[in-house]
């Protein structure tokens, strides 16, 4: 039976396709394009997510792409293998939503969290081994070594993940973050102290403040993307907690600093 690999994001999907090609397989990869670690999740209707994302960028095809993803899954006759890492808020949220959506339908998983993967460096030097935290950051050669490591999810596991996601949905908080106890809801200002901590009385490019914040929030978990942090920069400017020289939505040209 052929396998349909489910990837938790565009980047992860690209790496997984390359991994499958390296392995000489013709299995299909289907990538989920939404980031469920942020924004409202109380509705299953793709139009609700599309409306929310429209506040940040223009992507008219988003709703259709989301509907097409779930339609493809529902119609799939292949064996379903879902890839994710629990140390990524984005990937963990996707898997919980997947478990809720699939219900009792059988599927396999490759949870890369903590797996030691080998990959070749681009300069041709000896292969390196590292523990994985998210599919999106594992090189394709590393993912190739994990092909065939999938396992069938038990009904008990599926039900537990479903309950977890439904609890998060009932809270529908602005953010979902990784904790030692699993994925948890977080308020809209959760990342504000980090953004302010990376800001100084001197002008800095918004991109630098956001980048430094992302780095500070990447150990031991990947918590948030640059777009959501940019939105919080704009909010902090509007609240007078940061000053902006330029349009704070322009990450590359705008500069920000702490007030005097």
Image: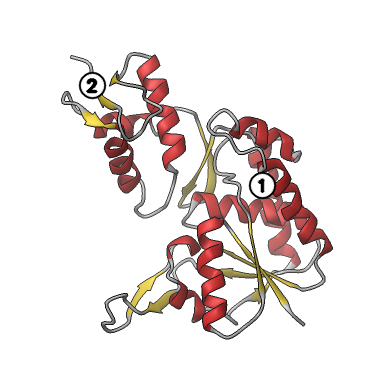
Tell me if residue 103 can be seen: no
- Specify the label residue 258 is tagged with: 2
215 vs 64, left or right, is: left
- Specify the label residue 165 is tagged with: 1
Image quarter for residue 128?
bottom left
- Whole-percent x and y of residue 60? 66, 37
- Specify the label residue 48 is tagged with: none
- Whole-percent x and y of residue 256? 27, 25
115 vs 61, left or right, is: left
- Whole-percent x and y of residue 58? 58, 34
Q: Nearer the viewer, residue 61 or 239?
A: 61
Tell me if residue 226 can be seen: yes
| Residue depicted at x 31% and y 48% | 215
| Residue depicted at x 75% and y 65% | 155
Q: Residues within 10 Å of mark 2 (few under 14, many from 20)?
A: some
Q: Residues within 10 Å of mark 1 (few under 14, many from 20)?
A: many
122 vs 1, left or right, is: left
| Residue depicted at x 39% and y 79% | 118
Q: Nearer the viewer, residue 180 or 17?
A: 17
85 vs 78, left or right, is: left
The mark that comes first in sequence, 2 or 1, is 1
Q: Is residue 159 above or below residue 169?
A: below
Q: Secondary structure at mark 1?
A: helix
Image quarter for residue 92?
bottom right
Q: Nearer the viewer, residue 8 or 154?
A: 8
| Residue depicted at x 30% and y 45% | 216
């Amino acid at each position: 039976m052929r396998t349909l690999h489910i990837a938790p994001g565009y980047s992860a999907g690209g790496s997984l396709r390359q991994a499958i090609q390296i392995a000489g397989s013709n299995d299909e990869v289907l990538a989920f394009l939404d980031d469920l670690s942020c924004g409202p999740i109380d509705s299953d209707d793709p139009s609700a997510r599309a409306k929310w994302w429209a506040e940040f960028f223009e992507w008219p095809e988003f709703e259709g792409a989301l509907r097409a993803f779930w339609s493809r899954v529902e119609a799939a006759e292949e064996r379903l293998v879902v890839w994710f890492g629990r140390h990524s808020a984005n990937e963990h949220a996707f898997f919980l939503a997947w478990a809720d959506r699939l219900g009792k339908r059988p599927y396999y998983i490759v949870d890369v969290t903590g797996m030691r993967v080998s990959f070749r460096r681009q300069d041709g030097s000896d292969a390196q081994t590292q523990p994985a935290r998210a599919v999106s950051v594992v090189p394709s050669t590393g993912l190739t070594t994990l092909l065939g490591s999938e396992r069938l999810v038990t009904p008990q596991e599926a039900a537990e993940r479903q309950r977890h996601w439904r609890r998060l949905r009932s809270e529908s908080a602005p953010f979902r973050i990784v904790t030692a106890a699993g994925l948890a809801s977080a308020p809209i200002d959760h990342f504000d102290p980090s953004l302010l901590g990376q800001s100084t009385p001197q002008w800095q490019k918004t991109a630098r403040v956001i980048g430094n914040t992302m780095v500070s929030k990447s150990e031991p978990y990947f918590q948030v993307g640059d777009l959501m942090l940019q939105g919080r920069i704009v909010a902090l400017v509007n609240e007078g907690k940061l000053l902006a020289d330029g349009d704070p939505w322009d990450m590359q040209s705008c500069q920000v600093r702490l007030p005097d």
